[in-house]
Amino acid sequence: MANEYLLKFNKAFENRVRLGVMSILMVNDSVEFVRLKELLQVTDGNLASHLSALEKEGYLAVIKQFINRKPQTSYAVTAPGKKAFNEHLNSLENLLKTRKK
Amino acid sequence: MNSTEDQLKSLAEMRDLMNRSSRFLSLSGLSGICAGVFALIGAAMAFKYLYFIDDDLYAGADVPIRFYTFFFVDAGSVLLLSLLAGWYFSNKRAKKAGVPFWDATALRMLTNLFIPLAAGGLFCLALLYHGDIWMIAPATLIFYGLALLNASKYTVNDIRYLGICQIILGLIACIFIAHGLIFWALGFGVMHIIYGTVLYYKYERGK
């Protein structure tokens, strides 16, 4: 049943921007806010709200530091974030497999 | 979260983001072809110099100083021209695709390329210092192959196989030491041209 797999879908990832953020952070140690914005082609406000949602879930770690006296915010994925994203991908894969049959 | 097509589309988008954010994808096949051509010219000049002009090398005498000068100018110009071609064609490709040429991925790729490459360069200088000039050609091939293997994680994956080929050629060259220049021309010349052409047809032509 397709619905069974749907239940395992993580609500936190039900968005294009959030999936994009997680994809980028899975393959990079840490990524700056500006670079995320550039890669995803979204506005500051939009990106910030999705980032804080993911942060609240405990999937993202925020790294704030000063570079040449300018504040810079970078993001990295946490261990629970990695686990949740992998599980989400697995259920997506299973769903696609069952639909193919 | 509805149709299969939507899911597949979002998967494709995620894969694209993973690649674009972590790999330097502007690397142009044309720069590989150019580097190969420069290497072949450099090797031909070295061949002419070593085998037809300089009989002293075989007379058992000490290696003359002009050999070193020639070696540095020849190898140095090949390296410099290849880097310039690499910069020119990759920059052009990045502009065409509308992406920045110099960003975090470019820096990461170059850092990972140049660490083994610089170690190899210094190692070759040490060989030169001790007069083991016949091991230089195999050593450059092996270290260049290792450098490519290392950099391949941060750019198009095809470079990995080019690196492995260079390492194998270098190891064979270690045995057939008298033909070092031929292996060098094969590795830096012919292999670059083949790989450049493959990359160009795979990623650039008509895109």
Image (cartoon, rainbow, N blue to C red):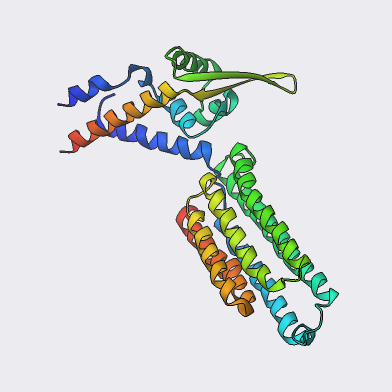
Q: Nearer the viewer, residue A20 or B48?
A: B48
Residue at 57% across, 67% down: B170
Total marks shown come to: 0
Q: Is residue B100 left or right of residue B14?
A: right
State the image coordinates of residue A54 (x, y, percent, origin top left).
44, 17
Q: Is residue B67 left or right of residue B195?
A: right
Q: Is residue B36 above or below residue B87?
A: below
The quarter of the picture where residue B123 lies is: bottom right
The quarter of the picture where residue A1 lies is: top left
Residue at 63% across, 65% down: B139
State the image coordinates of residue B108 (x, y, percent, origin top left).
61, 41
Residue A58 in view in this figure:
yes
Residue at 67% across, 60% down: B82
State the image coordinates of residue B141 (x, y, percent, origin top left).
60, 64
Residue B6 in view in this figure:
no
The quarter of the picture where residue A71 lies is: top right
